[in-house]
Image (cartoon, rainbow, N blue to C red):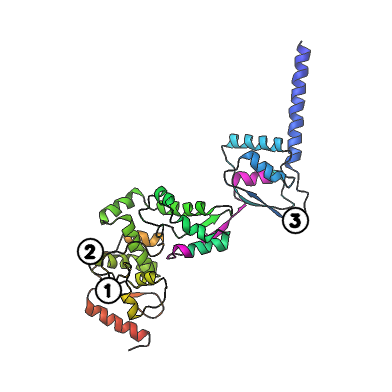
């Protein structure tokens, strides 16, 4: 009986050693192809699906071995697998592939920068160009009741809430997933502290974002954002018309230089014609502009005009007289008297 037991133990040990040897030999195998290929691992793929994807290129084969091996590593190290596009060269061993999908550090992503101050259509155009997203579907989703309700957006579209930043995408995202990603980053701004500042401002979130979008459109300089925010909030406080050119341009649907006749255009967004805060944002302001509007500079400025020298800087004034003098400086800089 003991001899049989010993024999079984020896056979078991031999089997384990053979399995280890076999596994090591498979881990060290290299691809049979001579060119670099890209393997796409979709989001939320499980281990079996990932291995099956690599199996199409005769990698991580046999599937039963590598599926179980990866699951053991995941459990042992409390790790997950990462989606993405993985470049596999002829010198990438199976062992290296496993390391790649367990770290995600080798996944190719498409980095897309969304500039501050764009409208939803302009953002849709970027994603259509970079990721092949249908821009009409993208725009339709930004107005969908389900999306607005999901993110507690109290407006008829998500303009003002699509946060401009640089994002990494794997290339397999849907329009819905992309919009959710932008909205999630916007939501991250609203910490408990910032929600309290919003409450103390006396503005609704939509109103604050509307002011932030005007601030974003009025100055290209981050150093001026808090000053400009303070200026427009001063106007709101005393009931003065905002008289912001970008709101009229938004109403006209054209970012052209305004003519006097444009200031008579009938639209609730025409802040030369209608007092108060416009119905909603005129663009998607960046994080800096939103934070500047939550933390405006305390001053008595009510007027601003550009230097006129191409620097993007502005003169700020407390009175009409000071402002008129600054306008003269602007005209001189522009070569006009």
> Which residue: 47% across, 51% down?
180
Q: Is residue 114 magenta?
A: yes
Instruction: Label 1: state its secondary structure.
Output: strand
> Which residue: 71% across, 49% down?
92
Instruction: Label 2: state its secondary structure.
Output: helix
Residue 299 left/right relative to 91: left
> Which residue: 39% across, 72% down?
252
Q: Which residue is mark 1?
A: 303
The correct choice, above or below, for 20 with respect to 283 in the image is above
Q: Is residue 126 visible?
A: yes
Select label 2 or label 1 by which is in front: 2
Mark with earlier residue (2, 1): 2
Residue 80 left/right relative to 143: right
Res. 35 mark:
3
Neighbor class of circle 3 (other Cα within 10 Å; few <14, some 14-19, many 20+) is: few
Residue 296 left/right relative to 282: left
Instruction: Label 3: state its secondary structure.
Output: loop
């Amino acid at each position: 009986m003991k001899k049989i037991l010993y024999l079984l133990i020896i056979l078991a040990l031999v089997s384990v050693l053979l399995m280890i040897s076999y596994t090591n030999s498979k881990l060290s195998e290299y691809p049979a192809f001579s060119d670099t290929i890209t393997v796409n691992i979709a989001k939320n793929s499980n281990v079996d699906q990932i291995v099956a994807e690599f199996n199409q290129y005769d990698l991580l084969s046999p599937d039963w071995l590598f599926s179980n091996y990866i699951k053991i590593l995941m459990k042992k190290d409390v790790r997950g697998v990462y989606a993405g596009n993985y470049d596999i060269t002829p010198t990438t061993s199976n062992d290296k592939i496993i390391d790649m999908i367990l770290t995600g550090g080798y996944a190719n992503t498409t980095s897309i920068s969304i500039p501050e101050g764009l409208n939803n259509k302009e953002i849709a155009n970027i994603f259509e160009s970079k990721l092949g997203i249908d821009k009409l579907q993208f725009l339709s989703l930004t107005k969908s009741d389900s999306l607005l309700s999901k993110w507690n957006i109290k407006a008829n579209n998500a303009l003002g809430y699509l946060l401009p930043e640089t994002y990494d995408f794997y290339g397999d995202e849907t329009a819905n997933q992309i919009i959710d990603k932008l909205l999630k980053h916007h939501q991250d701004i609203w910490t408990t502290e910032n929600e309290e500042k919003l409450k103390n401002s006396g503005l609704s979130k939509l109103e604050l974002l509307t002011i932030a979008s005007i601030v974003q459109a009025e100055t290209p300089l981050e150093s001026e954002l808090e000053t400009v925010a303070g200026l427009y909030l001063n106007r709101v406080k005393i009931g003065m018309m905002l008289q912001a050119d970008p709101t009229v341009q938004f109403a006209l649907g054209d970012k052209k230089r305004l003519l006097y006749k444009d200031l008579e255009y009938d639209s609730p967004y025409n802040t030369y014609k209608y007092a108060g805060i416009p119905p909603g944002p005129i663009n998607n302001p960046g994080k800096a502009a939103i934070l500047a509007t939550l933390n405006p500079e305390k001053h008595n400025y009510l007027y601003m005009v550009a230097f006129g020298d191409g620097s993007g800087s502005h003169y700020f004034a407390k009175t009409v007289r000071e402002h008129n003098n600054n306008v003269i400086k602007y005209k001189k800089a522009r070569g006009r008297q």
